[in-house]
Amino acid sequence: MFSNKRFLLPVIDAVIVTACMYLALLFRFEGRIDNAHMASFLRMLPIIIFVRPAIFWLFGLYKGMWRYAGLRDLSSIIKAVTLGSVVLAAFIFFLRLPYSRGVFAIDWLLNLVLVGGERFAVRALREWRTERVKRMKRILIVGAGDAGEMILREIRSHLKSEYLVVGFIDDHRAKQGMSIHGVKVLGRRHDIPQVVKQRNIEEIIIAMPSASGKIIRDIVSICEGIEVKCRTIPGLNELIYGRVSIKEIRDITLKDLLRRAEVKMDLPEIASYLEGKRVLVTGAAGSIGSETCRQIAQLNASEIIALDYNENGLFFLEHELKKDKNSKSVSLKIALGDIKDKEKMRLIFARFQPEIIFHAAAYKHVPLMEDNPAEAIKNNINGTANLVDLADEYGGHKFINISTDKAVNPISVMGASKRMAEMLGQSKDDSKTCFISVRFGNVLGSDGSVVPLFRRQIAEGGPVTVTHPEATRYFMTIPEAVQLILQAGAMGRGGEIFVLDMGEPIKIVDLARDLIRFSGFEPDEDISIEFIGLRPGEKLHEEPLRVQGAVRATIHECIFVAEMPRVDGKRLKADVEVLKELAREGNRHRIAEKLKEMIPEYRPNVKKK
């Protein structure tokens, strides 16, 4: 029996040979076929439709694979067409029908061109498709969900000539072997190396916007092991309305490896305590401070007072916010000053009368503060005390102190100074101002994080310096940290120390290796990694924010409240005065001893000098 294609070819040929004879008559008689020849054509029509395809069959023109047509096949076509013309001429002679000999010559030529052309066109089309497929980049999509389907649809709509989606990868058992728009699910995550090898995959697209950072890191690790390019689409919190587009496909970034669940914000609650308010942000030129200004500017605050002693940072922040269309409705005021200067701070409070204060100004580098403990006291404790007193004096509504995970069971001066900053707010339990603190870990890409340092070291050709091969830290992105700070600010009623869920800890050495690869180099080959040992005040592993004392959940799944001991305000004030004097003297040993006395959980690991 004929297959569908083999049955179709004789039908096509029947149409072609009929058209050839009719066109031959038109050409011969210059478009005006007389009645006698038209009558002969109609009588010959059944014979033409039967004879030529039958002869084509005898010569094997329906048996060959025409995508491989060659010179031998051309010879068969010439013989079949010629014999067909002879047989048709014989029928005309025996039936004694009027027919011009020139018609047979034209009909022979047309059959040769069209019948032969039809077959050789199959080969040409096949070769064109093969060459086109060779030029196309072979893609494997990881994630056979809605995002993966959208990417496949968009590639076919806009990038047909550039990309060929070969298959999907998905860990879901029920999806194995299923197809999306004709593209099959070829296996699970652990099958990627085998699929890449078998299908000659050139690039992998991770289409899993809701996947955790751990899953993304695992897939990236697999791709690095088989040396295939891996790209992704942003996480859900970066996508607008959850829509996925090929425009969002990009190279993997550190943010993708960190990817955490989307932060759910209660925007009405946040907007209600910021709308129409005068908001002071200290440390406004820093990573957290500047992002706080950006987000507040979109929440209908009436005025933002950006305070810092970093002149250049404030200049660029002012330029950015005034240029941003979403921030033009808020009045931006720039205040240049040092939080250690209480009289300058008093002038700023008197002039601007801030209602909400976000306190982000702090010294954050642990080893530097170990070497300069007096400066940590002056800035992180005395500076905070100045702001806390002035917020209370000038009737601020809320004071949100931005703290750190290093304040949990601190072993460094920096951690202890930030714990003291928290205690300063806790001591104001009789104030009309709502004082709260928000603790979180490292923020990816901030001025004080390891990422900018690693980037500089890579640019210089290495080595990239890591303290310890097992050192881990908790990370979140700057926008996410600020979103949670704003949310905690809305929830605070006074005296709380909010702790943020930081997810799973990440090895610093893994972060370094990923950054080296993202920069186009191979770790330990192109760029070396050097372990320099833990520096004074550093922990091998930062403790989870929820280990110290009891914590209680809040209505927000990522925010908890630490149950901390009550602070004696009068005693704390006296102790802070002692610390001020010790800082003026620069007595490192006495400072450490006093901090240990004030914070029982403080266990300094520095050598006494």
Image: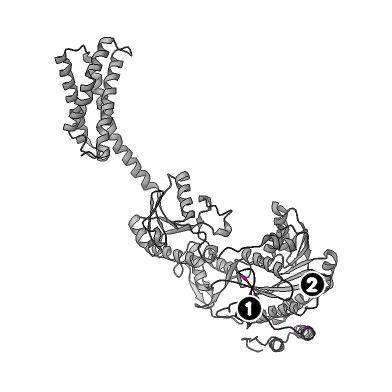
Tell me the kind of residue under disc 2.
Thr
Residue under the point 28% across and 30% down? 12
The x, y position of residue 475, in whole percent, is 58, 70
Task: Identify the image quadrant of residue 535.
Answer: bottom right
Q: Which residue is mark 1?
A: 551
Tell me the kind of residue under disc 1.
Val
Taking 58 as reference, is 552 left or right? right
Disc 1, SS: strand
Q: Which residues are magenta?
A: 552-571
Callout in the foreground (2, 1): 1
- Judge the density around disc 1: few (<14), some (14-19), many (≥20) Cα neighbours within 10 Å: some
Task: Identify the image quadrant of residue 57.
Answer: top left
Q: Which residue is mark 2?
A: 433
Taking 448 as reference, is 574 left or right? right
**Label whose residue precedes the other's in the sequence (2 or 1):** 2
Disc 2, SS: loop
The x, y position of residue 117, in whole percent, is 28, 31
Taking 131 as reference, is 535 left or right? right
307 or 534: which is nearer to us? 307
